Amino acid sequence: MPARPTFSFRPLTLALLATSLAGPGTSALAAENAAPLKATAAASSARETAAETEPKAKGEKGEKAEAPKRTAAPKPVDPLEHVRERLAEKLGATKPAEVPEPNVVRVVTRATAPVASARAPRLNAAASRGDPPSPLAERLATEHRARAEAAHAQWDYAGSGGPDTWGQMKPEFARCSSGLRQSPIDIRDGIKVNLDPVQFDYKPSAFRVLDNGHTVQVNVGPGNSIDVGGRRYDLVQFHFHRPSEERINGRQFDMVVHLVHKDIDNRLAVVAVLLDRGSAHPLVQNVWNNLPLEKGDEVAARTMIDLSALLPTERSYFTYMGSLTTPPCSEGVLWMVMKAPMPISSEQIGIFARLYPMNARPIQSVSGRLIKESN
């Protein structure tokens, strides 16, 4: 019975590997080494085929096969070794260590030096050497600290948050130092003309008292307004300053109350009523009776106030264009300062002074503004 032919898969595997390396989907390196692999695979296949068929042929003629002489066989050359070496050269890798698996490609990359993190702190060379800082460095450090303190400071009437620093605290406060129509002013040399009287439409109203950290502010209900030059302004709130912020021919009064109004276009008009030491003022006392116990608190009063009681009987006034007297010091504010003061008692002044001994902005430059005065 004829012997069944046997096959070796190793030459076939090498041939397939060589063909795949030379295929269109491989890299240039694989294509370059595909031809040697094909030749090696073909030679190996021929040798193994000859070795298998020669004994079978002799057996069929009845001849006794001679035992092969045992000689030291040369160490087999791995056909993939060439591929590994070329691949290592292309990748810039070190030569891999010998491994028992002949068909495994191992690539060892070069170790690189660690890259310093971009966020790592930079050392100051002068400080590390113990050198004293330069005058420029000291000045820059001082200015940086001043800006940082100003950014976190709360505006006030004295100290680090005083009026001289308002303009540098925030971008929106810049007008406090750069504006040309700032308030308050010392009212002098007004042009006497026949000013139209301010038409007050005040009535008894509910109110709430707020200690906002800078003054005592009274928020009133709707329905109170003034009419100036044919434009209507609604009363929003009124508040107090000690001493008076405005001066008339250099004279400063004990206190002043500012009644803040706003029109439909959000333009502001402020009526200032000067308060001079004298008898007690009933409306002021009503406000003091409802003072909140804590700053930031707001107390809703159970009574009503008649805002007309704040106004003097004589309604002549000074008028000019100015600004808010507190940050952000917005300009374009219409000011009307009543010429006749209203009385307030020493006790009532003392109550406010317990909360705010001084909350008046310094006098600002007139800057050539036109001031009108009622005849």
Image (cartoon, helix red, strand yellow):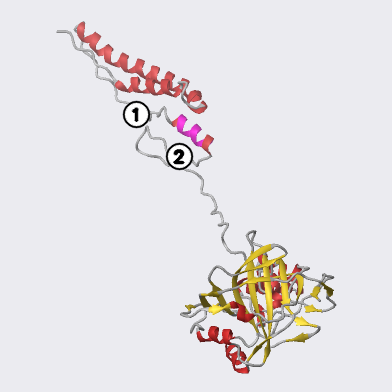
Q: Dividing the image into 4 quarters, which one contains the N terminus?
A: top left
Percent position of residue 127, x then y: 66, 73
Q: Is residue 70 above or below residue 147?
A: above
- The segment highlighted magenta reads 82-89
The residue nearer to you, when weighing 27 against 201, is: 201
Percent position of residue 9, x then y: 30, 21
Q: Which mark is residue 72?
A: 1
Q: Is residue 178 left or right of residue 286?
A: right
Percent position of residue 246, x then y: 73, 80
Q: Amino acid at mark 1?
A: Ala
Q: Dividing the image into 4 quarters, which one contains the C terminus?
A: bottom right
Q: Which mark is residue 244?
A: none
Residue that appears at 50% across and 40% down: 93
Percent position of residue 302, x then y: 46, 80
Residue that appears at 50% across and 83% down: 290
The residue nearer to you, when weighing 93 against 183, is: 183
Q: State which tag comes first along the sequence, 2 or 1.
A: 1
Location of mark 2 (residue): 107
Q: Residues within 10 Å of mark 1 (few under 14, many from 20)?
A: few
Q: Secondary structure at mark 2?
A: loop
Magenta: main secondary structure equals helix
Image depth: mark 2 or mark 1 in front: 2
Q: Amino acid at mark 2?
A: Val
Which corner quadrant of the image does residue 249 belong to? bottom right
The residue nearer to you, when weighing 260 against 372, is: 372
